[in-house]
Image (cartoon, grey):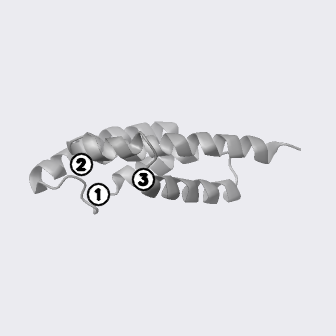
Amino acid sequence: MLAAAAALFALGWAASAEYVRRTGRDDPKEVVVDEVAGQCLVLAAVPDDPVLYLAGFAVFRVLDIWKPWPASWADRTLPGGLGVMADDALAALYGALLMALAALWWSLP
């Protein structure tokens, strides 16, 4: 899952950079590869458990909307494809950490 997140981030950066260049729009809402890559990163920290998968999805959505620092900084500051991808990747790092801690707690007797 981690490899998928990294590959999607790299491909998404390139594709969204081209899309932003062609459309002239900074963070087009129809570009969703950033959310997919972010979800992959969060779910990489989750063991094979449907409850934790659902929790990981919810945690990422909240963090993606809230955009805690530095995701908020990246969203406002970084240009082009990097700007499209980086805010979600940073929010996903927070999500992955939270989900790794949740998985650890979940596995305690």
Please say if the residues under marks 1 and 3 sit with CB atoms less than 8 Å apart: no
Circle 1 sits on which residue? 31
- C-alpha gap between disc 1 and disc 2: 7 Å
Q: Position of residue 64 (x, y in %)?
A: 44, 54
Residue 16 image label: 2
User: Furthest-right residue in view?
Assistant: 109
Please say if the residues under marks 1 and 2 sit with CB atoms less than 8 Å apart: yes
Q: Is residue 66 left or right of 58 when viewed as pictured?
A: left
User: Furthest-bottom residue in view?
Assistant: 30
Q: Viewer-proximal residue, 24 or 75?
A: 75
Q: Is residue 106 left or right of 39 when viewed as pictured?
A: right
**How many dots with numbers?**
3
Mark 1 packing: few (<14 Cα in 10 Å), some, or many (20+)? some
Mark 2 packing: few (<14 Cα in 10 Å), some, or many (20+)? many
Does label 3 or label 2 sit earlier along the sequence? 2
Does label 1 or label 2 sit earlier along the sequence? 2
Q: Position of residue 16 (x, y in %)?
A: 24, 48
Amino acid type, callout 3: Val
Q: Secondary structure at mark 2?
A: helix
Q: Viewer-proximal residue, 64 or 45?
A: 64
Amino acid type, callout 1: Val
Circle 3 sits on which residue? 36
**Residue at figure coordinates x 34%, y 41% from the top left:** 73
Q: Position of residue 81 (x, y in %)?
A: 24, 43
**Residue at figure coordinates x 42%, y 53% from the top left:** 36
Is residue 53 at least partly visible in the picture?
yes
